């Protein structure tokens, strides 16, 4: 009897985890246009705006990071390495979720800013994490919160690695940072044309007459 109870408990846990993944928002159909992203998921605008107000990283930079890191997939992990070329093996890192935060730095974020119930598969927590991390980058390195290329270099290499210039010998990382910066510029231009749509966060507000 005890054995069956244990098995049912494990089954329930597995179904719960599967359910979390099943009910996560699908990635936006058009990830090249921030207006379309927020039209599909208006709550993401609220999350990014809150993080911007709290930590200072612009909305468009946050979303450019997430587009690069996870393509807006909530439960993504790095692909497994292959042993002998075909046997599924370990993953190269513990990165997970929208922001691809790794276990150690996510633990620091939880302890310092978010609490232990924060989730890497939740967009509100992911945008808050990016804001928190970039604010720490600014404190530790002096990089401006309006410099997405170098913020991303520090995000990828860590603040210590950034200060050592570890990225200089990594052309792939430098290329990724330039792409993030280009995406942020495009997202900024797009958001300027549509942001009023997403500022109507009160039941009595009607676009285009509301302003946040």
Image (cartoon, rainbow, N blue to C red):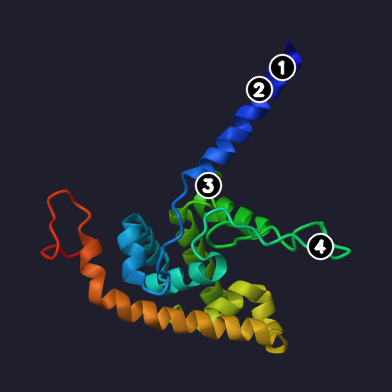
Name the residue that disc number 3 marks.
115
Quarter of the image that includes the N terminus: top right
Name the residue that disc number 2 marks.
8
Res 63 label = none
Height in image: 116 above or below 87?
A: above
Residue placed at 65% from the left, 24% from the top? 9
Question: Which quarter of the figure has residue 32?
Answer: bottom left
Query: Is 109 placed left or right of 148 in the picture?
Result: right
Task: Give the alpha-carbon distance from disc 4 to disc 2, as whole Å.
Answer: 33 Å
Query: Going from the N terminus, do you reach mark 3 or mark 4 first?
Result: 4
Name the residue that disc number 1 marks.
4
Q: Position of residue 114 (x, y in %)?
A: 50, 51
Question: Which quarter of the figure has residue 8?
Answer: top right
Residue placed at 65% from the left, 60% from the top? 95
Quarter of the image that includes the C terminus: bottom left
Q: Nearer the viewer, mark 4 or mark 2?
A: 4
Secondary structure, mark 1, is: helix
Task: Give the alpha-carbon distance from disc 1 to disc 3, as whole Å.
Answer: 35 Å
Answer few, some or many: residues within 10 Å of disc 3's Cα (few below 14, many 20 plus, some between 14 and 19): few
1 and 3 marks in contact (CB < 8 Å): no
Residue placed at 40% from the left, 70% from the top? 56
Q: Position of residue 117 (x, y in %)?
A: 53, 43
Query: Going from the N terminus, do you reach mark 4 or mark 1 first?
Result: 1
Q: Nearer the viewer, mark 3 or mark 4?
A: 4
Height in image: 9 above or below 1?
A: below
Answer few, some or many: residues within 10 Å of disc 1's Cα (few below 14, many 20 plus, some between 14 and 19): few
2 and 1 marks in contact (CB < 8 Å): yes
Secondary structure, mark 3, is: loop
Answer few, some or many: residues within 10 Å of disc 4's Cα (few below 14, many 20 plus, some between 14 and 19): few
Name the residue that disc number 4 marks.
82
- 171 and 134: which is toward the camera: 171
Query: Going from the N terminus, do you reach mark 2 or mark 3 first?
Result: 2
């Amino acid at each position: 009897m005890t054995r069956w109870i244990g098995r049912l408990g494990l089954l329930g846990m597995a179904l719960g985890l599967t359910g979390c993944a099943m009910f996560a928002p699908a990635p936006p159909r058009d990830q090249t246009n921030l207006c379309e992203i927020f039209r599909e998921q208006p709550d993401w605008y609220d999350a990014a705006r809150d993080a911007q107000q709290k930590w200072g990283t612009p909305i468009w930079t946050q979303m450019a990071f997430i587009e690069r890191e996870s393509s807006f997939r909530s439960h993504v992990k790095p692909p497994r390495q292959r042993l002998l070329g075909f046997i599924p093996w370990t993953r190269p890192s513990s990165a997970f979720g929208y922001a691809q935060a790794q276990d150690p730095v996510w633990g620091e974020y939880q302890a310092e800013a978010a609490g232990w119930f924060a989730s890497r598969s939740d967009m509100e927590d992911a945008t808050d994490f990016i804001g928190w991390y970039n604010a720490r980058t600014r404190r530790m390195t002096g990089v401006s919160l309006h410099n997405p290329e170098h913020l991303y270099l520090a995000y990828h290499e860590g603040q210590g690695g950034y200060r050592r210039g570890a990225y200089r010998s990594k052309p792939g990382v430098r290329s990724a940072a330039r792409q993030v910066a280009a995406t942020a510029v495009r997202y900024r231009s797009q958001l300027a044309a549509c942001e009023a749509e997403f500022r109507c966060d009160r039941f009595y507000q009607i676009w285009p007459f509301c302003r946040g």
